[in-house]
């Protein structure tokens, strides 16, 4: 069992180094066609810095969460949340989910734009179907700190992930195991998430 965990960590380390090397190569060659160097240099540099810090952080090494980049785009992060408050309803649900899919992780999508870190990323739950915990019908996470009025450039992606994990577990976030697949496919997607986020934000304003 120990050797399996060591092997998994070694594989994660290799994957991490390969990702950083690929991003560095793209940045060095200013490969605009790949979408990395295109856009704001400030956003790219800040996200590259944060990615390096995360790969060396204790929370990442302790497998509180893991991440990869969608199509190697520095603007689109896929985050898997593996750990939440053990006294929460969501933690119990994640244990049940693990029995179903073998992983039991909450999948999040972080979408950054050229104004980062001056403006917040858009964050949504991709899987599973979660109710409560500031999650809207389409999966968008609607927290004050993810709005322009509540956001500050002092926030880091790592601190944001930790705060989202806390919000999900402390505000009655739970998995809707009986959600029909048709409902999930129709409403739990990026389009509906962005639409619902804008609607909720408008109501708050």
Image: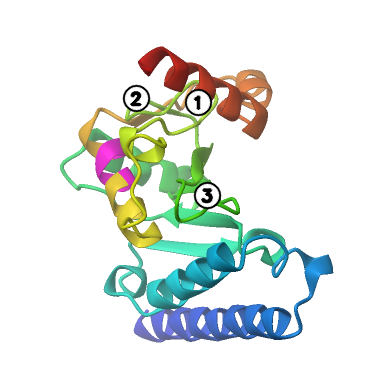
Camera sees residue 127? no
Instruction: Tell me the quarter of the picture where residue 181 sits.
Output: top right
Residue at which label 3 appears: 110
Is residue 171 rendered magenta in the image? no
- Specify the farthest residue to the top: 203
Pick the residue in front: 68 or 53.
53
Residue at which label 1 appears: 197
Q: CA distance from mark 3 to mark 2?
A: 19 Å
Q: Residues within 10 Å of mark 2 (few under 14, many from 20)?
A: some
Relative image position of residue 203 (x, y in whole percent): 41, 13
Camera sees residue 47? yes
- Secondary structure at badge 3 equals strand
Indicate left or right for 108 with 56 as reference: right
Write down the region rendered in magenta: 164-168
Residue at which label 2 appears: 132
Q: Residue at the spot x=46%, y=17% of the render? A: 202
Q: CA distance from mark 2 to mark 1?
A: 14 Å
Q: Residue at the spot x=49%, y=30% of the render? A: 129
- Mark 2 vs mark 1, foreground winner is 1
- Secondary structure at badge 1 equals helix
- Secondary structure at badge 2 equals loop
Q: Disc 3 vs disc 2: Cβ atoms closer than 8 Å?
A: no
Indicate left or right for 188 with 176 as reference: right
Relative image position of residue 36 (x, y in whole percent): 70, 67
Indicate left or right for 71 with 194 as reference: right
- Sequence-earlier tag: 1 or 3: 3
Relative image position of residue 74 (x, y in whole percent): 61, 64
Question: Does the magenta stretch mainly form a helix, a strand or a loop?
Answer: helix
Q: Residue at the spot x=66%, y=58% of the render? A: 70
């Amino acid at each position: 069992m120990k050797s399996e965990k060591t092997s998994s960590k070694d594989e994660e380390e290799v994957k991490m180094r390969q990702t950083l090397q690929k991003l560095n190569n793209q940045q060095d060659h200013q490969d605009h066609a790949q979408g990395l160097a295109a856009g704001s240099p400030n956003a790219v540099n800040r996200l590259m810095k944060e990615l390096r810090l995360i790969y060396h952080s204790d929370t990442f090494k302790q497998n509180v969460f893991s991440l990869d980049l969608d199509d190697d785009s520095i603007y689109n992060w896929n985050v898997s949340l593996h750990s939440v408050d053990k006294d929460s309803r969501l933690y119990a649900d994640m244990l049940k989910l693990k029995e179903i899919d073998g992983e039991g992780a909450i999948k999040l999508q972080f979408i950054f734009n050229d104004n980062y870190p001056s403006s917040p990323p858009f964050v949504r739950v991709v899987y599973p179907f979660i109710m409560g915990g500031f999650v809207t019908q389409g999966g968008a996470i609607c927290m004050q700190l993810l709005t322009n009025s509540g956001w500050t450039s002092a926030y880091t992606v790592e601190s944001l992930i930790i705060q989202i994990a806390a919000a999900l577990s402390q505000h009655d976030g739970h998995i809707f195991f009986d959600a029909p697949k048709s409902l999930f496919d129709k409403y739990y997607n990026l389009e509906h998430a962005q639409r619902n986020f804008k609607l909720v934000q408008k109501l708050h304003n």
